[in-house]
Image (cartoon, grey):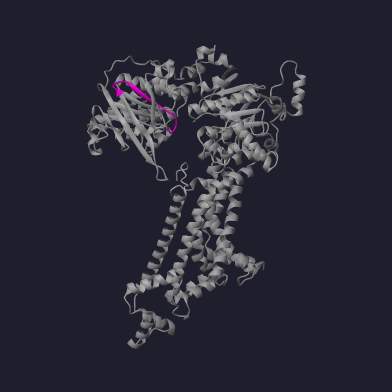
Amino acid sequence: MTPTSPSSTPRAIALQVLHKLGTALSVLIGAVTVAFFAQTALPGNRATAILNIRAGQAVQRTPEELAQINQQYGLERPLVVQYLDYLVGALRGDFGHSYQQYRPVAEIIGEQLGATVVLALTAIVIAWILMVVWVTLTAGRGPRVGAIGSLVDVTAAALPAYWLGIILLLVFALGLRLFPVIGGTGPAGLVLPALTLAIPLAGFLAQATRTEFERALDQPFVISARMRGQGDLGVRLGHVLRHAILPAITLTGWALGATLSGAVVVESIFSRPGIGQVLVTAVNSQDLPIVVGIVVLISAFYVLANLLVDIAYTIVDPRLKGAAS
Amino acid sequence: MTVMETSTTLDELDVLDIVDAESRPAPRLRVENLRVAFPNRAGPHQVVGGVSFDLARGECVAIVGESGSGKSVTARSLVGLTGRDAVVEADRLELHGRDTRTLSPRQWRHLRGKEVGFILQDALVSLDPLRAVGVEISEALRLHGWGNRASRATRVLELLTRVGVPLPGLRARQRPDQLSGGLRQRALIASAIALDPDVVIADEPTTALDVTVQAQVLDQLEAMKERGASVILISHDLAVVARLADHILVMRDGEVLEQGPAAQVLGAPRHEYTRTLIAAVPSDRTRGTSLSGVALPEQIAAPAARGTVLEARGLVKRFLTPDGLSTVAVDDVSFDLVAGETLGIVGESGSGKSTTARLALALSELDGGEVRLLGQPWSAIPERKRRRLRRRISVVYQDPLSSFDPRWTVERILLDALPADTARAARLPRVRELLAQVGLGEEALSRFPLTLSGGQRQRVAIARALAPRPAVIVLDEAVSALDVTIQAQILDLLVALQRSEGLSYLFISHDLGVISHLSDRVLVMKDGVVVESGPPDDIFLRPRHPYTQELVASIPDFDPKGIS
């Protein structure tokens, strides 16, 4: 984190990129491993479970029935071989077949992923807009405004998504009839679900940003800018904001993954398609390949988000470029 | 050139004023009975009470004072940036004959940067650390609608060239942290004078700068003055003020205690406080005398040890840069610290002086050479064996706050510093004795470091260093963060302790005045190498190495008796 010693030789940068990619890959392999062994650790015989899921009833199976399933899914092989087989498949994007739907996991997730990603990204963009406007207007304006600002931050951050979603639905869809009640994937159907995710997130981001914003407002360079004739808003937007958003960027990396896995509540309230719904169905029916597939996918998003955070960091604060982090 | 530059920013009113005035043009800035108060729980709290002065073309008015004197608040009030809730009142506050008390925020914005430039201390934080300096300079132009993108870029290069920045095209694209202290301070100046304001306010423009850089900045301010700009210089440093000021105001606790022509205030001060300030400035002329007016003990105690107490031979220390390359921070440094004496190590930032201090304390592993303490191996033995000798060498740092546990009282801090073998019954009496030695009363025992003043904290740090009865104390910039009168008291305390306890000091500082006041021998370091060493008179009066000559020439000459 030393500000003064940028190591920007091509070799150093190449090493850093390699290091980052290596870390990302090992995190993904770790996620696949944990998810795979977690499903084998479940009590009971897996072949029996698969048959029961398909039949929708829990009965004792004959060895002949089980042998067929064991053979079909390769369950008779040693666990290590199954694991390596799954790992190699996962690296190629093949997560096996759903027990229930008889289709490749990748295909099932792929159909639903788009809607959820659009929802998550829209929510994050809205959260940032809300946060920047709110913090810029209220931070560093004396104790009274500051207290109101913080109170709103905390309240927003503490709002439970299911409650907020229902309220928004009641007011704007059922009451004012501004938006459709049943979401669908169109832009109009996106607004309320995205707001449901965005408002608590904006509260979190604002809390983190507010502290830094007020710290930056006290810095001498703010006085210098004012002394040059820069106005208050100009200082806030042109200088202070950039210093204040680093913690919010870190949180956004986390939020990208968390919104994806937390989308389920919002998707059920607004009856939106998405992997949240798929996940809930799969968990309820013990369709483990899908559960594992989604878990790995969300870890992949976390890894991607962290890489993006690192890149965003060096763009916002070029002093960090090349500094060993 | 001069005429052009000033006339661009003079408005019509000024021209009329100049025509009207018979002998002297009207002052550019008139301040009469300026008062500033901040509200707190108990009601309005006055921080500036009645400042008055006029500022004419090409004139420099200096406001001198220690921290809390209200000098910076005064400066900010002049440009309407006193701060939220501040109540600013004045009988008269005029810039170019225009009353600034009634200006709207929008009118102020048009005025700042264009008619008044403002230079703050330490460009590392006074320029936006995330931006290239060229963008900052250009912002000053853009905000006042000067030129277009292309002409502003050209103007930025012109300005950087004018303040003496070489390779302006490259420097304009660099951030403050990528520039040296001198270059970034000059970039800060360029951003303040981008539109040739004819009033420039410089608030501690050289504080925290190395002495050679300070000299360059003062040259720049002097050049501005010669071009006809009026300068308000805010400083705690009388030597800096003496070089530029025509008129001086001395402030304390918001009150102007004395003001007048520079020669009179510095040469024949009328107020007691001004005399205290002037007497407190350390230099080679003050060696062996008291700076704060207390009586120093005659040399009575025999040195706590004999001969050479600390011996360094060929010290080398390398560090790895993030690139994986190695840089030499300390290169073949040797010295002897004689019992009862002070060895001063002086150098600018990055000279390796603090690394040398860590090596002397055996807190860093050496890459070459050896340190011996009291004639015994010191750096060459393992830490376990060093412990027995550790109590013979202590250290005091610049900022004691960060080396105290904030949850500990002074009593606990000092009890903790006593040697483990001190008898239980003797511990508290010894702590009281230590406090008395550093001039603190017993009421300090129950205080927490945060509730102490800077000077008191440094006294506790010295008491802690004295606790194990050392023979050697390493003082690393120990007085650098203190106000000049407090610094004088601490320096006097150090001299008194040296005489009564027979201590030896390894005194590290960037401040040549402090070094020349205190040292029996001086080591001048640059880039990890000792460039010159010898008695202070040789170093300061007959420097031989070109770098030492440059350093000594950079010291603002402050001889109050020579001024009058």
Q: Position of residue B347 (x, y in %)?
A: 42, 28
Q: Position of residue B121 (x, y in %)?
A: 54, 32
Frontmost residue, B456 versus A104: A104
The C terminus of chain B is located in which quarter? top right
In the rendered structure, the answer to whether residue B481 lies left or right of residue B81 reads: left
Residue A48 lies in what quarter of the image?
bottom left
Residue B86 is at least partly visible in this image: no
Residue B314 lies in what quarter of the image?
top left
Query: Is B349 contained in the magenta span?
Result: yes
Residue B220 lies in what quarter of the image?
top right
Q: Position of residue B225 (x, y in %)?
A: 63, 23
**Residue sitting at 67 percent across and 68 percent down?**
A177
Frontmost residue, B549 versus B266: B549
Work out whether B75 lies above or below A201. above
**Residue sitting at 36 percent across and 74 percent down?**
A82
Q: Position of residue A83 (x, y in %)?
A: 36, 72
**Residue sitting at 42 percent across and 81 percent down?**
A53
Residue numbers of the magenta segment: B337-350
Frontmost residue, A25 versus B387: A25
The N terminus of chain B is located in which quarter? top right
Residue B166 is at least partly visible in this image: yes
**Number of numbered discs:** 0
In the rendered structure, the answer to whether residue B120 lies left or right of residue B298 reads: right
Query: Is B28 contained in the magenta span?
Result: no
Work out whether A61 lies above or below B536. below
In the rendered structure, the answer to whether residue B387 lies left or right of residue A146 reads: left
